[in-house]
Image (cartoon, coloured by chain):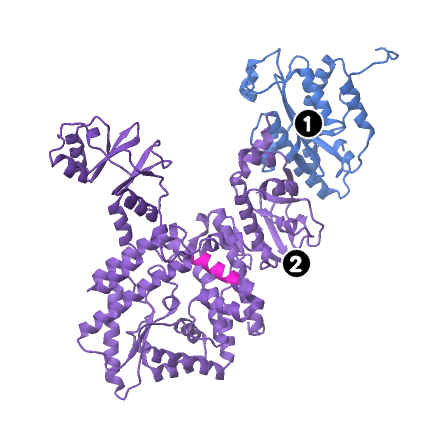
Chain colours: A blue, B purple
Amino acid sequence: MSWFKRQTYPEFYTNYLESFKGKSNTLETIRFVVFDTETTGLNPKSDRILSIGTVAVTNFQIDVADSLELYVKQEQFNAKTVEIHGLLKEGLITKTEETQAIQQFLAHIENAVLVAHHIAFDVAMINEALKRMNLPKLKNKVVDTGTLYKKTKYLKDETHYSLDELCATFNITMHDRHTASGDAYLTAVLFLKLTALLRQKKSRLSLRDLTGWF
Amino acid sequence: MKNTIAERVLDFLKGFPPFDVLSYEQLFKISSQVKVIYLEKDHFIFKQGDALHDSFYIVKDGAIGIYRDIALVDECDEGDIFGLRALIRNDNYLLDAKAIEESIVYSISSKLLEEIIINNTEANQFLIASFATNTRNPYSDEDKGTLFANETILKPNASSFTEVQSASFSKNPITCDTHTSIKDASLIMSRNKVGSIVITESKQPIGIITDKDLRNKIATGHHDISEDVEAIMSTPVITFPPSITVAEAQIAMLRHSISHLCITKDGTVNSELIGILSEHDIIVIHGNNPSVLIKEIKRASSAEQLQHIREKAQVLLKNYIEQHIPISFISNIISAINETITKRIINLSISEIGAEPPTTFAWLAIGSQGRKEQLLFTDQDNALVYEDVSNDEEVKSYFLELAKAINNKLHIVGFELCPANMMASNPKWCLSVSQWKIQFENWITKPDEDKIMLCNIFFDYDMVYGNQELVNNMSDSIFKAIDSYEIFLNFMGRNALKNPPPLSFFRNFLVEDSGEHKDQFDIKARAIMPLVDAARLLILSENIKDVNSTIARYQRLAELEPQNKDLYDSCINAFRILLRFRTQQGLKHHDSGRFVDVDSLSKANRLKLKGCFKPVKDIQELIKVRFKLSQML
């Protein structure tokens, strides 16, 4: 890596960086963006994003108006995963080029704290896309609802709890499962329920309690 | 752009009023701006005195309890709206809203409320209704109005009553095409036993042949039966839309000198034929006209004939209810029919006995019949009073025999015998004027629960037949006794408060003050009777005679106490809605309509009924204060 070569970024990316200058400190004022990606497979390097769905949570309210639903045009196509997410290569839905989708996504999330179920994978998918655009990784803080669940139970194991399992545990009616927006919404409800549980345990909850480890 | 989340919200909202009346675009706009809030059990969404939020709420999952101080005011379940009232008042919250169980609620901004919902007349009506349900002061002018739209907008048009009814026409018109021969068309007509056939082309009516054409054009030899129908049909036909009223039909038939009208989808000749309305249909409709029925009753010579006429009246009742004719108008007509039937039966019974009454008497309808509020066939309740005589035993036995004959005939007509035997054939309720006076004095000065119940039934008497003088005497004695023993009214008041209305509906249950849930709603005991009892008590305390119906009583009370006019008006509205609702239920289930299955109630009906509980509660409150009953309870 060259330390001295001054990187010039496209405008959308500098805007994204700009947004991190302002700071929100309390959980009530922080904007969380809950999101999910549907992909052609599970390998961030070789697989591609098919769709991104987001919905924001501010002051512990899911704000349907503050959401994004993107479908990405494909070069690669994995027929096997079609039966899971139902996204065909040429569907009826309006699709966006990957670079456009990432631009829109960054403009939407800004400095929000990102929330997803097993977020490492979704962030890796976005980061790979950024890499293809010669851009650095996401800078946002992240909260993983899988980890958050374990915090409510004081579990320290490595078990993965699927979104299905947790929706069942928390009595969340599942709709539009396996669409990015549908899963993002379910994850947002799960996020509200988990943070409510954590607030019971600790009255002055801070962002660190959500993102950090024990 | 696709918006899966908003679509899901829309799917939910569209199932509930007022969202169900919005257009897809309007509803989508709302859905895409909803905020979703999760509440743990016992968490508040707002508290009394809190500053106004800029939104109102709809329960998505779970249940929200609404409290004043700590008393439960309402329970909201899936699809119920709350937090709206403060928004319309534009002031701090007066109530608490707390999750009774883990809940998810949607919040909708006040901006959208104004922009979309208020501008939709139908949605706005619903909101005003739900708004009025919970208001602390529901009698101010701006809060009233559209809630009772059904009852107030429709003004009775007494003179031409059947004329505004929509005409019922034959829905399966007999048709043929233009190339059918006259002979074949006639065969079709006689096979279907009809007096007319419509000639159609691609389902649109182009001509008609009636019996009269066959007589004038075929039998006279002007045309041959082998010719096509085209040769003799009358064309073009006169068409009307299905909403045609009897009056319109009559005018059209007179103006065009025709006996048949074609009913088409949009009322023009260029749309599909869906029925035919003949002069005969009009005559049949008029046969169910109340004045015709009353004439028939007066001519009837047996109870069996009267039974048949009363059944026709039942059909009339059903039509009126379906057509949203004002309920007080309907009850006047049905009462007039019942009264005429009873009079006719009394005359028939007297001539059957073969001896004129030994002295003057009066036949009294009591209870709901006395109040002229009996729309469905229910039990008969009646009593008899006769002049004081020296040979009481003899006279009484005559009237008992007469009453027995009358009760039996009423039974044949369809009024069940009263299981509690509150009928004139019971020696206890067939008395001379003096005996009634003693009876009333006893009830009034030595009241107990049974006697109060008897007062509630007998004080609502209405003379159906006989000597008015005797009845006036009875009334005088009641007021005299009450005057001398005022505490009686307190007893009556205590009785009037026996059945408080329920709080509201929640899921498949009725919510009681105690928090208890019930799956059946006794609309008579819990809502109608409390209003009836309150009206009777208040009118008695004002010393007013001869005002028997609940509505008339409240109207009189509103005149006497202008300061309470709004409350009394709301009682009248509630009573009308309840009476109509009960009648609909009764007609639908062929019973007294008294018990309502909460499970089967639509959201809109729940709201309508809930709106009636408030005046019941308030009138009971007024009685409690006025008769100083808080210490007696």
Q: Is residue B373 above or below residue B599?
A: below
What residue type is disc 2 on?
A: Asp
Q: In this view, does B502 lie above or below A15?
A: below
For mark 2, what is the residue? Answer: B69
Q: Are marks 2 and 1 in contact (CB under 8 Å)?
A: no
Task: Answer left or right for B366 relative to B216.
Answer: right
What residue type is disc 1 on?
A: Glu
Mark 2 surroundings: few (<14), some (14-19) or many (≥20) residues within 10 A: few
Which quadrant of the rendered structure holds the C terminus of chain B?
Answer: bottom right
Element at label 2: loop
Mark 1 surroundings: few (<14), some (14-19) or many (≥20) residues within 10 A: few
For mark 1, what is the residue? Answer: A158
- The image shows residue B505 at horizontal and vertical percentages of 52, 52
Give the residues drawn in magenta, as a range: B569-579
Indicate the quadrant where residue A80 lies. Answer: top right
Q: Is residue A172 above or below residue B418?
A: above
